[in-house]
Image: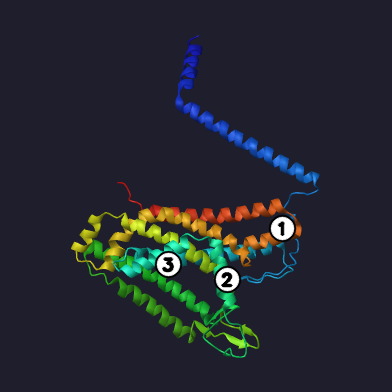
Amino acid sequence: MAIQVFGFKNALGLLRDVRFWRIVGQLFFVLFLVWLGTTLWHNLTLNLQKAGIQIGLNFIQSQASFDIGERIITYSPTDSFGRALFVGFVNTLRVTGIGMVLATLLGLVIGLARLSDNWLIEQLAKLYVEVFRNTPLLLQLFFWYFAGFAKLPSIDSNTPPSSLFYLTNRGLALTWVSATAATGIWIGLLTLATLIAIGLWQWRRWLRIERGVASRTWLWAGGAIGLGIILAFAITRASPFEWNVPRLNATELEGGLQISPEFTSLLLGVTFFIASFIAEIVRAGIQSVPKGQWEAAKSLGLKPGVMLSKVILPQALRVIIPPLTSQYLNLAKGTSLAIAIGYPDIYFVANTIFNQTGRVVEVMLILMASYLGVNLIISLIMNLVNYSFQIKER
């Protein structure tokens, strides 16, 4: 009898516990989501079966039978749809990665210019932000593509047969470096020398902090890399690369680094657009640093560049990084507008596959998974960076 009374009291106390009802509420919500997803999937498959359409990814292995004009990995029309999607995915990563670096650098410069004491520089930076931030990205892509490259001169008899660079309506061709037989040895030795230089840097820094010995970190690290260069040249007796100059062959450009108008327009569009938002994030982050930090740095006699890099920016990054992550995600998703100017990113390739196969559900799911994966990786990396800059509680 006592056991029954004890159990009844425990059950009654559990029903009065707010934490219990919170857990029950969350459990019911999860069950509701599972039921909703199952119902929607059942309705989708039922309707597709009535239309004679089967769901599956078996079409991925079928021959694509279409070409992709721009790619950095091997591909031919005889390859599968899966290979075509991978080529488009690599093209998307290419724009996303380069765009993140360029937008960050440009946004940092414009953000600092917004805080300049020079009236003209500050107004020009403000004009840049207002123009690029308040016009649609799609409109900017059209501007760079149709009003930019489409109006450039074409290749004709007046075009020089060889030049360091060509800027025509077919894109941009630059003098670039190409690998030689000695490139692999150079990369291996320089990688080893860099790792040794990092170790020496940490060792000399430890000696300076623990024993008060003059560190000369730059001398030790630079010496290690210099010895690596000397050793690589002594072994190979050759340069690690050679210059590849673009040349005109009839009406075609060969050699060098050739960048298509579509890629350049997309890269310029997302870079200038996202940089306008990053500039405001940088400006707000710097202005969030207490005025006393500026005054303390000035009282120590620090130069403006040292003060900014050693005192202000490390504190401002705690405010800058979280919203900066959102802009990187917007950049990755904004590359899907490449279809408007014909750049073969994953959305462009997926649209072609959908038109050929009619597999709308599978193709859309692949697209969603691709963008979701890229954004989750960006978020993970930026969260780790953000954590490293946060103040650690003791």
Residue 308: quadrant of the picture: bottom left
| Residue 2 placement, left or right of 197 | right
Q: Which residue is mark 1?
A: 354
CA gap between label 1 and label 3 equals 37 Å
Disc 3 secondary structure class: helix
Q: Give how far across and how far down residue 282 sits, in percent.
A: 38, 59
Residue 146: x and y in percent read 59, 71
Q: Residue at x 60, y 64 (%)?
A: 338
Upstream in sequence: badge 1 or badge 3: 3
For disc 2, the marked residue is 145
Q: Is disc 2 placed on a helix, strand or loop?
A: helix
Is 184 positioned to the left or the right of 207 in the image?
Answer: right
- Residue drawn 68% across the image and 55% down it: 363
Question: Could you tell me the amino acid type at mark 1?
Answer: Phe
Number of the front mark, 2 or 1 = 2
Q: Upstream in the sequence, badge 2 or badge 1?
A: 2
Q: Where is residue 137 drawn, in percent x and y?
A: 53, 61
Q: Is label 3 in contact with label 2 (beta carbons under 8 Å)?
A: no
From this view, report whether residue 98 is shown above or below residue 379.
below
On screen, residue 301 versus residue 182, left or right, reads left
Q: Amino acid at mark 2?
A: Tyr
User: How many other residues sit within 10 Å of disc 2, few (<14), some (14-19) or many (≥20)?
Assistant: many
Q: Which amino acid, mark 3? A: Leu
For the point 59% across and 78% down, which residue is it? 169
Give the residue number, with chain letter if any, for mark 3: 106
